[in-house]
Image: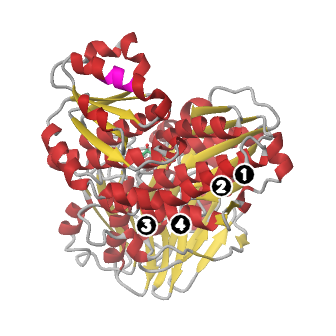
Amino acid sequence: MCGIVGYVGFEQAAPILLDGLSKLEYRGYDSAGMAIMDEEDKIEVVKAKGRLQVLREMTDSGHAVPGVCGVGHTRWATHGEPSVANAHPHFNKDKSIAVVHNGIIENYQSIRDRLVKKGYEFISQTDTEAVVQLLDYYYQGDPLEAITKVMVRVEGSYALGILFQDHPGEVYAVRKDSPMIVGHSEEGNFIASDVPAILSHTKNVYYIENMEIVKLTKEGIKFYNIDKEEIEKEMVTIDWDAEAAEKGGYEHFMLKEIYEQPKAVRDTISPRIKDDRIEIEELGMTEEEIQKISKIYIVACGSAYHVGITAKYVIEGMARIPVEVDLASEFRYRDPIMEENSLVIIISQSGETADSLAALRAVKEKGIRVLGIVNVVGSSIAREADNVMYTWAGPEIAVATTKAYSTQLASIYLIAILFAKVRNTIDDQAYAGYVEEVKALPDKIQTILGDRERIQWFANKFASSHDMFFIGRGLDYGIGMEGSLKMKEVSYVHSEAYAAGELKHGPISLIEKGILVVGIATQPQLYDKMISNMAEVKARGAYIMGVTNYGNYEMEDTADFTVYVPKTNPYFTTSLAIIPLQLLGYYTTLAKGLDVDKPRNLAKSVTVE
Ligand code: F6R
């Protein structure tokens, strides 16, 4: 939520900041702004409500604001409505300090009250303005001194980019519980909330830890701890390429990322299957430790939580380990009773989701082992988990996840099969069969993508729907949950997922003529029961879209429109049956003329509670 970028170097800063912000717009797009030090070393702030494009036009693509040093911001509003006054950067009273912020300052009101008593005036409703005014209060010519004083007084989460007018050519940055990376290149030095913002300039980055400070100049980068002592950092080279964060000829990132799924899944599984044997070194667990696991907790948010729902069926079914799945926002406050030999798996694309990170920390305090399944290398969850298994999806830019979700599923399958083998709950033949099926998934996903035009046609037909329902049993219920989320978050069509067996306990009263019900029926042992549930809603006027496996052609007796997916072992069908539902969400949104990559009110990386 909110994206920050900063630059100082040998080039003009504003065009670089605008380019970086365009890669961070997925983090928020309520307003955008930049602070640039011009040639007279005065700080000029430009900001605009709405999308980055407005700021781009206002500044003639950055050329109207000269200067080689600056910070930029794209906002997802938390405190105060989207407006120019609330847009970042924020100034102190004499406009000599400018601040951009990602995070939430929890004690901003008490800071504000204190400063108002001392004669300070606030012009925005943001929590961030408390930081810049507090900096002003403590600033006596030494940026590090003022910054560290502020850091120990503010509570909450923050990544800050700061300019001081009397320190021209210097960008200061600091973080606590909000992401921030530092980049180095020949053309200059950078800060950014996420890698794609600077990928076209450099792949050389440093990760700064909580409560560390960085000072950028065009000549170099210096890191400090809270005691203002200089510290050393190791540079890391990112192996994403810049094109991966571009649309590459696709109309939208979401469609591009849907199409990247075969590759992303292949990249995630291939390095972990050697000679048809699964080896996941990153788990860091011996066979004995795997045998001892008494319970697995899967903790995540949104789509990653839906991966957890699938994981429960797959891990319990194959490896016979009890699995509890929790929403991170609930888990972190419920003080669960955890056995010593439990394993907690935190699933997160960004690795920065505030609730998932807080859940991780709560678990670590109890001394329980935490495994992160994470996409963004070097993110907070990746660094703080005891072990991390990376999903190799590459940068995911569209707000609605597709390829990261698919790679998270693939990681879970590998873990489930490995655990089952080590714990002897499957024999060699079943093991070999599962490995074969997982290896075949990328090609099967590719086949389904070929059905895109039929789904587009169908989506156009139902784009004006007000409500939709997704029903399924067992693993198909989990698929419905993700399909429903994809639909509602991008197309704004109200949609709900129900376990089909629950319909008669209430939701069936919502069914009326013409309403779209998507029935997912890929589980052989539950197939007939699903067909009955679909028939029941059809009898009450619903229009039925069915999703099932090739061969189940009698589905057409009940469904009005059927999408078939290739056969696989039932444990793995989530990876296939979700593809048409991702396309359905995508094309419904397109038919409604909405911005599919940037749905209203959402940001990709939810770094605040
Ligand atoms: C939905 C979506 C979100 C994320 C959720 C968790 O399409 O993308 O529901 O899955 O915000 O984010 P991460 O995986 O970054 O922790």
Task: Name the residue type under label 4.
Answer: Asp
Residue 5 image label: 3
Going from N to C along the chain, the mark reached first, 3 or 4, is 3
Kindly report which numbered mark, 2 or 3, lies closer to the viewer in this rendering: 2
Q: Residues within 10 Å of mark 2 (few under 14, many from 20)?
A: some
Q: Could you tell me the amino acid type at mark 1?
A: Asp
Tell me the mark number nearer the camera, choosing from 2 and 4. 2
Q: Is residue 533 magenta?
A: yes
Q: Could you say which disc has been placed on residue 428 in the image?
A: 1
Is residue 191 within the magenta segment?
A: no
122 or 460: nearer the eye?
460
Q: Specify the label residue 432 is tagged with.
A: 2
Does label 3 or label 1 sit earlier along the sequence? 3
> In screen coordinates, is 545 left or right of 272?
left
Residue in the foreground of this view, choosing between 52 and 467 = 467
Answer with the quarter of the image where residue 219 lies.
bottom right
- Evaluate if marks 3 and 1 touch, with contact meaning CB atoms under 8 Å apart: no
**Residue at image point 71% right, 35% down:** 321
Q: Where is residue 502 in the image (x, y as percent from the top left)?
A: 42, 17
Residue type beneath disc 3: Val
Quickly name the residue at label 4.
Answer: 267
Q: Is residue 193 visible?
A: no
Do residues under tags 2 and 1 come within 8 Å of each other at their CB atoms? yes
Residue 95: % across, % down: 37, 62
How crowded pointer 3 is (Cα within 10 Å; few <14, some 14-19, many 20+) is rated as many
Gap between marks 2 and 3 measured at Cα: 48 Å
The majority secondary structure of the magenta stretch comes to helix
Asked if the beta carbon under badge 1 is closer than 8 A to the nearest atom of ligand 1, the reply is no
Magenta residue span: 530-534
Residue 416 or residue 72, whichever sits in front: 416
